[in-house]
Amino acid sequence: MPQLDTSSFASQIFWLVVTFSFLYMIMVRNVLPNMTNVLQNRQDKISNNLESADNLKDEATQMEEEYRSFMEKTRGKSGEITAAANAEMNKISENKHKELDGVLFKKGLEAEERIAKARKKVIGEISSVSSELSVAIVKKLADLKISNKKAQEAVKNLLK
């Protein structure tokens, strides 16, 4: 094997150094700058993405705080609106109750007047019927004749 011949070691080492130097120069001038650029671009992109993620996280936190404060304000306003609506409904209810009480009181007075009139009418009819009936009863039981006028006076005295 010629590679193991000791007399050609010097020339093999020379061409080895030349070849590796040539390859090293190609690597340093062409490949390494491209790889460096690719790695630098990748690192820049990752850094930008991390910064964007931090910014978005801060924005999301701020939006969440704004949302919570908005919801608290909204709840407060809805509570105020509900309280105002309840107060208004209570006022309206009280006014309607007062109106209804007035109407019912008037109708009660009217009903009492009608009852009083009906009572007077019924008492008048009862007294006339009672006087006629008492005349008829006295005539049948005692065989006495009483005038209608005396019978009416007796019934009126009993009704009082």
Image (spheres, rainbow, N blue to C red):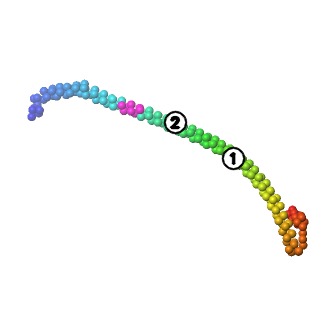
Q: Which dot marks residue 66?
A: 2
Going by the numbered disc 2, the residue's amino acid type is: Glu
In the picture, the quarter occupied by the C terminus is bottom right
Q: Nearer the viewer, residue 17 or 39?
A: 39
Q: Across the whole image, how many numbered discs are drawn on residues? A: 2
Q: Can residue 95 be seen here?
A: yes
Measured in 3D between alpha carbons, the distance from the residue under mark 2 to the one under mark 1, in whole angstroms, is 44 Å
* Of callouts 2 and 1, the N-terminal one: 2
7 left or right of 124?
Answer: left
Residue 127 pos. (x, y %): 84, 64
| Residue pointed to by mark 1 | 96
| Residue 26 quadrant | top left
Q: Residues within 10 Å of mark 2 (few under 14, many from 20)?
A: few
Residue 41 pos. (x, y %): 33, 29
Q: Nearer the viewer, residue 116 or 31?
A: 116
Q: Nearer the viewer, residue 115 or 88?
A: 115
The residue positioned 52% from the left and 36% from the top of the image is: 66
Q: Which residues are magenta?
A: 45-52
Going by the numbered disc 1, the residue's amino acid type is: Lys
Residue 131 pos. (x, y %): 85, 66
